[in-house]
Amino acid sequence: MHQLIFDLPVSVNKMYSHSRSGIRLSDAARVWKEYAALTGANQWHMDCGQDEPLKGDLVVIYHFHGSHMDFDNPLKVLNDALNGICWIDDEQITEAHIYVYRKDKIRRVELQINRKAS
């Protein structure tokens, strides 16, 4: 099992902005995604002792602390930020468990990443 901890992601409601050229990632989402990629890479290499992204099917357990978002709202930006770091692509996540602890004071998300048993 590999565990990572991040500040809460931006809501999907704030993830995209509209411009003349179409829909794009908002500045807030881009900044959070960069933060998560850097933080995730550091934790992945230093704390988890991993040099490469995991291959194969994965099970990810999400613990959202202090979040008042819909449970699935922050998943897109979070999973995309970890592409190429923890997994090759988030399509490898074939099982997910999501827990939300709305009353927690310290706002964060904790991920537990496991290879799926065959």
Image (tube, helix red, strand yellow):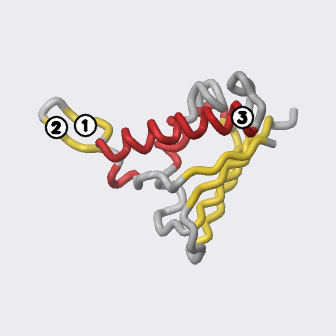
Residue that label 2 marks: 19
In the picture, residue 22 is in which quadrant? top left
User: Dot 3: few (<14), some (14–19), or many (≥20) neighbours within 10 Å?
Assistant: few
Mark 3: which amino acid? Met
Closer mark to the observer between disc 3 and disc 2: 3
Residue lying farthest left? 20
**Residue 64 drawn at (x, y percent):** 59, 61
Residue that label 1 marks: 23
Q: Is 42 left or right of 31, judged from the image as shown?
A: right
Q: Are marks 1 and 2 in contact (CB under 8 Å)?
A: yes
Residue that label 3 marks: 46
Q: Is 116 left or right of 9, judged from the image as shown?
A: right
In the picture, residue 71 is in which quadrant? bottom right
Closer mark to the observer between disc 3 and disc 1: 3
Name above or below for residue 52 compared with residue 101: above
Mark 2: which amino acid? Ser
Instruction: Tell me the quadrant of the picture where the N terminus can be found.
Output: top right
